Amino acid sequence: MSLDFSATRGPVLVVAPHPDDEVLGAGGTMARLANEGREVHVCIVTAGRPPRYDAAQAQRVRGEALRAHERLGVAEAHWLGFPAAELSDTPHCDLNAALGSLVATLAPGVMLLPHPGDMHLDHQATFLSALVASRPHQAEYPAVLLAYETLSETNWNAPNLTPGFLPSVFVDIGATLEAKLEAFALYESQVRPPPHERSPEALRALATLRGATVHRAACEAFVPVRMVI
């Protein structure tokens, strides 16, 4: 399935449960759209909070995120600050309201979301609240919703028991794959050596595989959730 992003109005909003999910799932697409003159925003839903997470480490990751976003050409990052790994205990209405307010303010034409079949409950809650925030009963709502894949989350779900990642939208990132890998490398605290999935080598391999699926050098793959043309 082909998709012309230029046919949509407004900025692009990438919603990430945690910092680095946005680069893992859509970094190449973000860089491509920014290079094409599109305004790209990132929403980071959670932040590490003591005592579960060290405050200094959480601050370090935030700095890494800002540097990664600069490399990709992101216009602005929005931090909602909900507690990481605790969205299952967070009132759903609170997350709905926070994402809804951001969507109303930015009026994005495209939203890129985590996949609902991801193993992490934070990813699942983020996806559901993003759907609530972008409901099409509003005067203005995102015309395109796509779900991205996050290595070490999307592929670790339970086959045949949770929604599988079956993409039919492929974005050619042949020209921006290196930017994606460089942006991920700026998340220094999150990078792991191969064969760990959160390694640059694994990201390159996945992009090569997704690209080969549609005879391209490198792609990011998405599952369409809604497309209004």
Image (cartoon, rainbow, N blue to C red):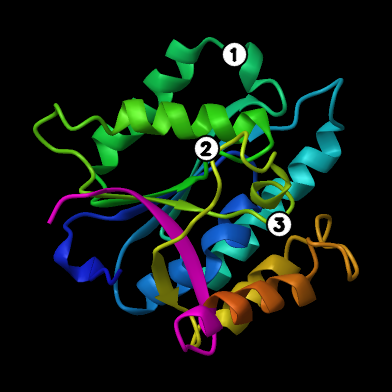
Q: Residues within 10 Å of mark 1 (few under 14, many from 20)?
A: some
Q: Quadrant of residue 98?
A: top left
Foreground label between 2 and 3: 2
Answer with left or right where residue 41 lies relative to residue 197.
left
Disc 2: which residue: 116
x, y (%) of residue 50? 82, 22
Residue occupied by mark 3: 64
Q: Residue at x 54, y 52 (%)?
A: 165
Distance of mark 1 from mark 3, alpha carbons? 26 Å
Numbered disc in front, either 1 or 3: 1
Say few, some or many: other residues with alpha carbon within 10 Å of mark 3 (under 14 / 14 to 19 / 20 or more). Answer: many
> Which residues fall within the magenta stretch?
211-229
Q: Which residue is mark 1?
A: 90
Q: Considering depth in this image, is 7 or 78 the residue closer to the camera?
A: 7
Q: As shown in the figure, which amino acid type bears the numbered disc 2? A: Pro
- Separation (CA) of disc 2 from disc 3: 26 Å
Question: Which of the two labelled residues, at mark 1 and mark 3, occupies the earlier sequence position?
Answer: 3
In the rendered image, residue 119, in percent from the top left (x then y), is placed at 68, 37
Residue 118 point in image, percent of width and height: 62, 41
Q: Residue at x 51, y 62 (%)?
A: 26
